[in-house]
Image: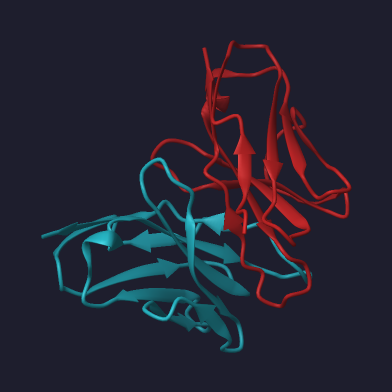
Chain colours: A red, B cyan
Amino acid sequence: DAGVTQSPTHLIKTRGQQVTLRCSPKSGHDTVSWYQQALGQGPQFIFQYYEEEERQRGNFPDRFSGHQFPNYSSELNVNALLLGDSALYLCASSLEGLGFDIQYFGAGTRLSVL
Amino acid sequence: QQPVQSPQAVILREGEDAVINCSSSKALYSVHWYRQKHGEAPVFLMILLKGGEQKGHEKISASFNEKKQQSSLYLTASQLSYSGTYFCGTVFNSGGGADGLTFGKGTHLIIQP
């Protein structure tokens, strides 16, 4: 049973560039959430996708956008990168309607902005 | 609105017990506990819902005091594999289905042989 997979594992960009991160949810899951984890901090919720639409959003600027595909995989796009965007980006998947909304995390993409 | 975790760090000898606390200033719908080892994904440990339902790993126990908006994670007879950073994630008002989690800053647990 494949868990949540993310690509790439590491990425280096420069300020002002744009980046796309990818996530494949755990088999059978239909909901994808994205989190940003700065060094030494807990993950911060960016947004969540369900049925190809953004359902919830945390306190992040519009530079952060996403997409969910019909196969439930998802992308996170960040435009006009800032140094402060350097972090571990985590994707979590869950199954709608279970009652227990357990979220399963991928290992993340480490983004460094120079 | 970020939940507050305590202690920030704890060092134990193998076999000792530990309690990690999570406190919110806002009414909670559910509390989720995760453990993260360095360079790895957070791993689900336990979910506790308002009303008393909970689900998690057999060897992990936790409590949820709805009136005090507090949750505690109990680690008994600790093993070396328990080392890592423990996070509580909270949901304030569920609109149904999965919700974005608001995580605390984490509790670092080190188990020594």
Residue B102 x, y percent position in the rendering: 57, 56
Q: Can you tell which quarter of the image residue B29 is in?
A: bottom right
**Residue A52, percent from left and from top:** 88, 48
Q: Residue at x 37, y 73 (%)?
A: B73
Can the viewer see residue A38?
yes
* Left or right placement of residue B9 versus residue A110 in this view: left
Task: Spot the residue most to the front.
Answer: A1
Q: Residue furthest bottom?
A: B52
Nearest to the observer: residue A24 or residue B92: A24
Q: Residue at x 73, y 65 (%)?
A: A95
The residue depicted at 64 percent of the width and 67 percent of the height is B92
Q: Can residue B1 be seen in this view?
A: no
- Whether residue A104 is situated above or below residue A65 in the rendered picture: below
Quadrant for residue B87, please give it: bottom left
Which part of the image, by quadrant, shows the N terminus of chain A?
bottom right
In percent of width and height, residue A7 lies at 62, 33
Q: Is B21 left, or right, of B76 in this rendering?
A: right
Q: In this view, does B37 lie above or below B69?
A: above
Q: In this view, does B88 lie above or below B54?
A: above
Q: How many marks?
A: 0
| Percent of width and height locating residue B32 | 53, 68
Residue at image coords 72%, 52%: A32
